[in-house]
Amino acid sequence: MRLFFFLAILIFTTSVQASKVALIIDDIGYRQTDEAVLSLPNKITLSVLPHTPLGETLAKNGHQQGHEIMLHIPMQALNGKKLGPGGLTNQMSEYEFKQQIDAAFNSIPYAVGVNNHMGSLLTQLDEPMQWLMENLKHRQGYFIDSVTTRYTRAGAKADHIGIPTLRRQVFLDNDTSKAGLERQFNHLISLAHHQGQVVAIAHPYPETIEFLQNNLSRLKENGIHLVNASELLPYRIAQQPTNSATTRLK
């Protein structure tokens, strides 16, 4: 009986300790206040918008501090909202689409993966998602679906092409009030214990940054490890890069 009790405690403790959270801060690059993301622990992944005034500098500085860098590519939305520079649409040819992705990567150094900014229309379309995943496979990248529509086809296309992929499970700061942030943070902790790993997305709002500065320690207190987004990937691409400019996951 004592042995059974000891094993039960050991299994429970190991399960709690194995819980992991990848927290991605995206929408980075336009505002001077975005620099505050560099005050956060370097296990937080930074996803930077292409061709933005501060994007290149923040990507470089973030990388130097040990943050994993992603590219936050604008994608066509159902509501017709303006995409900004580097946006992908369903009016583009395959050549234009892939050139746009290449230019976006060139504008954000050290990016090793992509998540979508908006994209409630584009992520539903098979052909554009095929083109995106083909480009990512060429550069040894990964994709995290922000899940801006329940009808997204991005994950299915990533699986078909052989791209490591994850889905966002929690938006931390749709409500930036203290009560709203607290509610979502508690949900994040609960989900991490229940599922073992969680992908969460937040934004560089001053309210969010302050909340994270004051509360991230609660993850460790609850036996949850904060990890880079790539650490949760189900597998890594084995294919060798075709040229020295291709980014590889490490």
Image: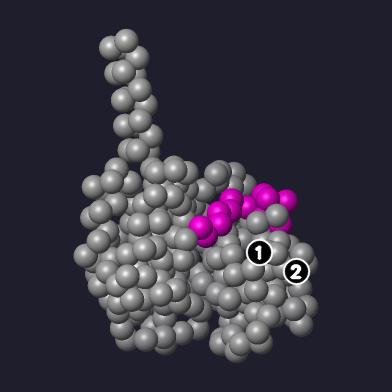
Question: Which of the pair 232/249 is nearer the observer?
Answer: 232
Image: 145 above or below 31: above
What amino acid is labelled 2 in the image?
Leu
**Placement of 177 over or under 213, stated as above or below:** below
In the rendering, at what x and y percent does residue 205 appear?
A: 35, 78
Give amino acid for label 1: Arg
Q: For label 2, count other residues whose C-alpha is less than 10 Å away and answer few (under 14), some (14-19) or many (20+).
A: some
| Direction from residue 177 to residue 247 in the image, left or right | right
Q: Quadrant of the N terminus?
A: top left
CA gap, disc 1 and disc 2: 13 Å
**Is there CB contact under 8 Å for labels 1 and 2?**
no
- Residue 172 position, x and y percent, is 41, 66
Q: Is residue 166 magenta?
A: yes
Choose top left, top right, bottom left or bottom right for residue 89.
bottom right
- Which numbered disc, 1 or 2, marks the residue that appears first in the sequence? 2
In the image, what residue occupies the spot 68% across and 68% down?
123
User: In the image, is residue 240 part of the stretch drawn in magenta?
Assistant: no
State the SS at label 1.
Answer: loop
For residue 24, which quarter of the picture? bottom left
> In this orientation, does residue 37 appear?
no
Residue 206 spot, x, y in % from top left = 30, 79
Q: Which stretch appears magenta?
A: 157-169
Vertical comparison of 184 with 77: above or below: above
Measuring from the top left, give residue 167's x and y in whole percent: 56, 57
Residue that carries the numbered disc 2 in the rendered image: 125
| Residue located at (71% from left, 57% from top) | 157
Q: Which residue is mark 1?
A: 150
Q: Secondary structure at mark 2?
A: loop
